[in-house]
């Protein structure tokens, strides 16, 4: 299992210089990946500074050599897919093949949708997401590409350079499990970063049984060719508790069930506290 660090892109982290510093610190401390939130206006109480995560990832890429870089997740329905495709290739170049693209349909209540008249209907956002992914993958081929969708059209575009990674940059799909739409979409790509759908007012951890059910669903909806390629299951996204051994036990059980990434969230706060949380390194289960 690999160990990721999730960082906010708001509050004290609404400064690209701070995120660059923390990302480089994560590599020094032994983390395997850095995953940045992607909000236009950060979802904090009140108005807070917010940083463009793509610019911050570029800065981290230049300052690091080993660590994987990703968004968690980019809401594609409020982006132009050809622009995302271009930015992703640039990050793949800067990092020499260390970028993963995390995508989702987004939160309709996020300011980046609700305050600027972006699509808010769940079905429409899902359609836009699927079209955007088709276009991004098609453009990354480096071959002349055309597309006629309900929301996007591309007319014989040749998109160069192609990604450093082959056959392309890995795509991890977010959304709620066991919702059928996000889960089927995740099966079509290279990994998932799904959250466990909860009853209102309830909070439950993923269990090994949940992961086994997810794995079975994914495998049942992948082609034989896809089954021959690695598939990432990224879970976590919460802060470390005070009971490290309890956290380890949960992580160990999920790793045994097939989880490939465990991501720990460090919330925005005092910089000294954030640095200390990063410098202690990941909670290894070995």
Image (cartoon, rainbow, N blue to C red):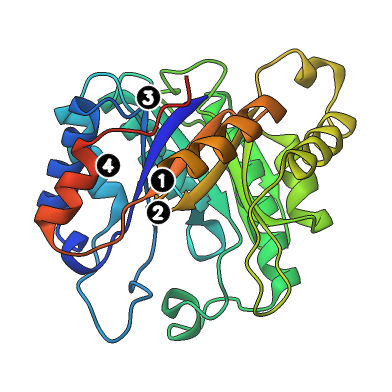
Task: Report the Cα–Cα distance between label 3 and label 1.
Answer: 19 Å
Nearer the N terminus, badge 3 or badge 1?
A: 3
Question: In the displayed structure, would residue 208 be above or below residue 206?
Answer: above
Q: Is residue 156 visible?
A: no
When asked about the image quadrant of residue 209, the answer is top right
Q: In the shown orientation, is residue 31 left or right of residue 84? A: left
Task: Report the Cα–Cα distance between label 4 and label 2.
Answer: 21 Å
Q: Which mark is residue 57?
A: 4
Nearer the N terminus, badge 4 or badge 3?
A: 4
> Please, what secondary structure does the residue beneath circle 1 have?
strand
Task: Report the Cα–Cα distance between label 1 and label 2.
Answer: 5 Å
The image position of residue 281, as x and y in percent, is 28, 33
For disc 3, the marked residue is 98
Nearer the N terminus, badge 1 or badge 4?
A: 4
Q: Which mark is residue 170?
A: none
> Please, what secondary structure does the residue beneath circle 3 have?
loop
Given this view, does label 3 or label 1 mark the residue nearer the observer?
1
For disc 2, the marked residue is 239
Which of these two is toward me, 55 or 259?
A: 259
- Using a 10 Å C-alpha cutoff, classify the residue at mark 3 as few (fewer than 14 neighbours), some (14 to 19) or many (20 or more): many
Q: Is residue 69 visible?
A: yes
> Please, what secondary structure does the residue beneath circle 2 have?
loop
> Please, what secondary structure does the residue beneath circle 4 have?
helix
Q: Residue at x 54, y 29 (%)?
A: 170
Q: In the shown orientation, is residue 258 left or right of residue 214? A: left
Q: Residue at x 72, y 61 (%)?
A: 127
Q: Residue at x 67, y 49 (%)?
A: 206
Question: In the displayed structure, would residue 94 be above or below residue 86?
Answer: above
Nearer the N terminus, badge 2 or badge 3?
A: 3
Task: Report the Cα–Cα distance between label 2 and label 3.
Answer: 24 Å
């Amino acid at each position: 299992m690999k160990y990721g660090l999730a960082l906010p892109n708001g509050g004290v982290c609404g400064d690209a210089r701070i995120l660059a510093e923390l990302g480089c610190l994560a590599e020094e401390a032994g983390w395997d990946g850095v995953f940045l939130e992607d909000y236009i206006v950060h979802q904090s109480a009140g108005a807070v500074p917010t940083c463009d995560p793509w610019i911050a990832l570029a800065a981290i890429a230049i300052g690091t050599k080993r660590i994987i870089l990703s968004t968690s997740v980019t809401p594609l329905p409020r982006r132009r897919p050809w622009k995302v495709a271009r930015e992703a290739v640039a990050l793949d170049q800067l990092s020499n093949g260390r970028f993963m693209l995390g995508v989702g349909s987004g939160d309709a209540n996020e300011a980046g949708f609700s305050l600027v008249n972006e699509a808010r209907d769940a079905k429409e956002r899902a359609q836009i997401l699927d079209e955007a992914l088709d276009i991004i993958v098609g453009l990354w081929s480096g071959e002349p590409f055309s597309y006629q969708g309900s929301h996007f059209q591309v007319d014989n575009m040749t998109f160069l350079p192609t990604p450093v990674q082959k056959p392309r940059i890995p795509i991890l799909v977010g959304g709620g499990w066991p919702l059928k739409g996000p889960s089927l979409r995740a099966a079509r790509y290279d990994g998932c970063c799904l959250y466990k759908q909860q009853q209102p007012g309830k909070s439950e951890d993923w269990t090994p049984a949940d992961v086994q059910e997810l794995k079975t669903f994914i495998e049942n909806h992948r082609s034989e060719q896809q089954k021959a390629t690695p598939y990432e299951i990224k879970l976590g996204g919460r802060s470390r508790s005070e009971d490290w051994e309890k956290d380890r036990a949960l992580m160990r059980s999920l790793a045994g069930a097939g989880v490939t990434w465990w991501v720990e969230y460090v919330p925005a706060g005092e910089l000294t506290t954030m640095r200390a949380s990063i410098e202690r390194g990941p909670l290894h289960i070995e």
